[in-house]
């Protein structure tokens, strides 16, 4: 089995899908690894390190794509990579197909076995490959939001932690899953006033117990959203349904009610976003102003901390990749229902319910 590791080409992407350590593990299990030249440099890994771990280095992306049995990536293929996909190839990466109709058509046409990190399930029903990047994005969202509130960047000039004698900034987090919970943790740590909303009372109870009254927990409903968002200095959209398109939970009218210069960071943008006024941005141009509100919606936000994100992601993917190498693709899928849950496309068909519903298949 040959594993191909191409360099990520999405704007501002610094992560890589395989570390030298993971490479060494795969080689020890009998796989060959072909890494595109400089694929790991942005995350701090040199070609020499990959060679020492047993990989071969390719000077071109084309060779990696054309010869590999499994393409291991971080982000979904972009249009420039569509022609490089080989018929019947296995692709193991974040796919986010619910917001990627064109990519889905390509995967179906080329009969790609598309295994999406974001829908692989653990035995307890959690999503172990989605978790580390959700944690990174959640923590970064507060860091980014605090920065975007600065006056010289068009923000309202609010300091989230405030100072004695002034009110701290109000952070509203909608969604109390992994990303939302980590956003809450960072916001509390900065001294902000924090309100978190979710439909799952158990998640709210857990946060209430953890922070002992320092965080306001509310059920996520239109009335609460309308009231709290209007008072927010920073709104974090963290609503995620794995594999499915994110539901719109904050309307344009509610966004208009926010104070000028307030900021929105939508972590759910990979799945279409959960704020009506949101649209994808990039690391080159991360924000735009709409209705007087600063909007930030970079789909590959964790690339801002490429090394930490790479380490977190590859630690999570290692057991599944090792399984594919050791047992072979068919046997691994036959024996592991959690890995099967990650299969989004196979033999020209969509095999994930949420993706099929989102795209009308």
Image (cartoon, rainbow, N blue to C red):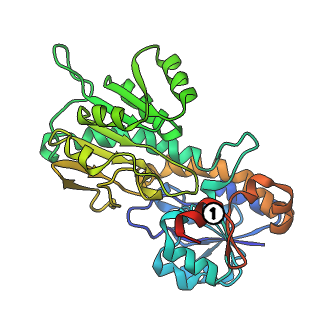
The location of residue 133, given as percent across then percent down, is 52, 48
Residue 288 place in picture, x, y as percent: 22, 56
Answer whether residue 40 is visible to the viewer in this image: yes
x and y, in percent, of residue 269 in the image:
41, 55
Residue 95 visible to an observer of this rendering: no
Look at mark 1 in the image and give the residue it sits on: 50
The front one of 45 and 341 is 341
Question: Where is residue 168, by image quadrant?
Answer: top left
Q: Residue at position x 53%, y 63% from top?
A: 358
Q: In this rendered view, identify the residue nearer to me: 141 or 325.
A: 141
Residue 73's place in the image compared with 44, above or below, is below
Name which residue lies at 18% across and 40% down.
150
Q: Residue at position x 44%, y 48% from top? A: 305
Q: In the shown orientation, is residue 338 left or right of residue 302? A: right
Q: Is residue 158 left or right of residue 338?
A: left
- Which image quarter is the C terminus in? bottom right
The reply, left or right, for residue 332 in relation to residue 253 is right
- Frontmost residue, 114 versus 352: 352
């Amino acid at each position: 089995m040959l594993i191909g590791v191409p360099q990520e080409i999405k704007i501002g992407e610094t992560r890589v899908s395989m570390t030298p350590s993971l490479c060494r593990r795969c080689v020890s299990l009998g796989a060959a690894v072909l890494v595109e030249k400089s694929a790991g440099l942005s995350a701090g890994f040199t070609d020499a390190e990959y060679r020492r771990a047993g990989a071969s280095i390719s000077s071109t992306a084309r060779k990696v794509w054309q010869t590999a049995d499994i393409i291991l990536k971080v982000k979904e293929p972009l249009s420039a990579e569509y022609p490089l996909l080989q018929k019947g190839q296995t692709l193991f990466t974040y796919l986010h197909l619910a917001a990627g109709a064109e990519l889905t058509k390509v995967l179906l046409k080329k009969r790609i076995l598309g295994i999406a990190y974001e829908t692989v399930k653990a035995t307890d029903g959690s999503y172990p490959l989605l978790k580390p990047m959700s944690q990174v994005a959640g923590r970064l969202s507060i860091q980014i939001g605090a920065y975007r509130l600065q006056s010289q960047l068009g923000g309202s000039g609010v300091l989230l932690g405030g100072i004695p004698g002034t009110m701290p900034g109000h952070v509203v987090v909608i969604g109390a899953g992994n990303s939302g919970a980590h956003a809450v943790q960072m916001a509390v740590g900065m001294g902000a006033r924090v309100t978190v909303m979710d439909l799952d009372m158990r998640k709210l109870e857990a946060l209430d117990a953890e922070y002992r009254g320092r965080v306001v927990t509310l059920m996520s409903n239109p009335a609460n959203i309308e009231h709290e968002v209007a008072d927010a200095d920073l709104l974090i959209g963290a609503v995620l349904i794995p594999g499915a398109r994110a539901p719109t939970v904050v309307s344009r009218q509610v966004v208009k009610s926010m104070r000028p210069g307030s900021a929105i960071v939508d972590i759910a943008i990979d799945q279409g976003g959960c704020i009506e006024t949101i649209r994808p941005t990039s690391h080159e141009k991360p924000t735009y102003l709409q209705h007087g509100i600063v909007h930030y919606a970079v789909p590959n936000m964790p690339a801002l901390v490429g090394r930490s994100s790479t380490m977190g992601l590859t630690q999570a993917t290692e057991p599944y990749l090792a399984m594919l190498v050791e047992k072979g693709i068919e046997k691994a899928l036959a024996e592991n229902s959690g890995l099967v849950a990650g299969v989004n496309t196979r033999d020209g068909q969509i095999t994930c319910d949420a993706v099929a519903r989102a795209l009308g298949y």
